[in-house]
Amino acid sequence: MATSSSPETAQTLDRGLRLLMLVADSVGGVTITEAAERLAVGRAVVYRLASTLAAHNLIRRDREGRLRLGMSVLDLARRAQPLIAEAALPALRALAEKVGATSHLTIADGGEALALLVVEPSWTQVHVAYRTGSRHPLDKGAAGHAIVAGRLGKQGYVTSAGELQSGAYGVAAPVLGVDGLEASVGVIALGPLDAATVGPQVIATAKQIAASLTS
């Protein structure tokens, strides 16, 4: 019988995790046969792995028999959000103080952009009040545009003017290189921002946060 530390058990865990990642990367789901081919294992192996993961609601089978992510994955993602925000806080605070504008870390949540963390500058008399938990469409605002750009592998910063709030200007950049995270870092101000100056600072902050999440 295999012990908890045996190569066989480690191989089973590895296969289970690979199956879970395969399902996560398959937008339309994946069949047992497709999964077996992609993982280079037998269909019976995939059946056993899928049954175990389904017992923990990490994956599910739809009406057509395709494997899709289960609700427990969403629960794990929600639990990870505070950890992401904690890791990003020092860099966002430094950005807000340096630029003198409200900084934020925004993540993709379904078809919306969700403000996961917002930091206001301490020394300005007037700044944008942007609440943590605020949502808006991904196709509006610099934060959303930057997330979409990140999906396409584009680097650099994007700008917006008055798309979410009249008179508000934004500069944002995608957070790249963190598996499973679609996010952007940006600043919002009530007046025009010097994008040539602020843009590189936002990019540097996005890279700093990505490094803190992958180190």
Image (cartoon, rainbow, N blue to C red):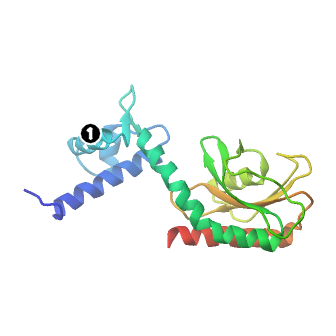
- Tell whether 126 sits left or right of 116: right
Residue 23 visible, this angle: yes
Q: Count every numbered label the image shows and give the total.
A: 1
Q: Position of residue 23 (x, y in %)?
A: 41, 45
Residue toward you, 38 or 53: 53
- Label 1 crowd bin: few (<14), some (14–19), many (20+), radius 10 Å: some
- From the viewer's side, name the closer residue of 1 and 45: 1
Q: Quadrant of residue 7?
A: bottom left
- Which residue is rendered at x = 23% and y = 61% of the image? 10
Residue under the image location 19 percent in, 58 percent down: 9
Considering the numbered disc 1 on the image, is that residue within a helix, a strand or a loop?
helix
Residue 82: name its quadrant. Answer: bottom right
Describe residue 110's horizontal placement relative to residue 191 as left or right.
Answer: left
Amino acid tagged 1: Ser
Q: Nearer the viewer, residue 133 or 63?
A: 133
Query: Where residue 121 sits in the image (x, y, percent)?
Result: 79, 66
- Residue of label 1: 51
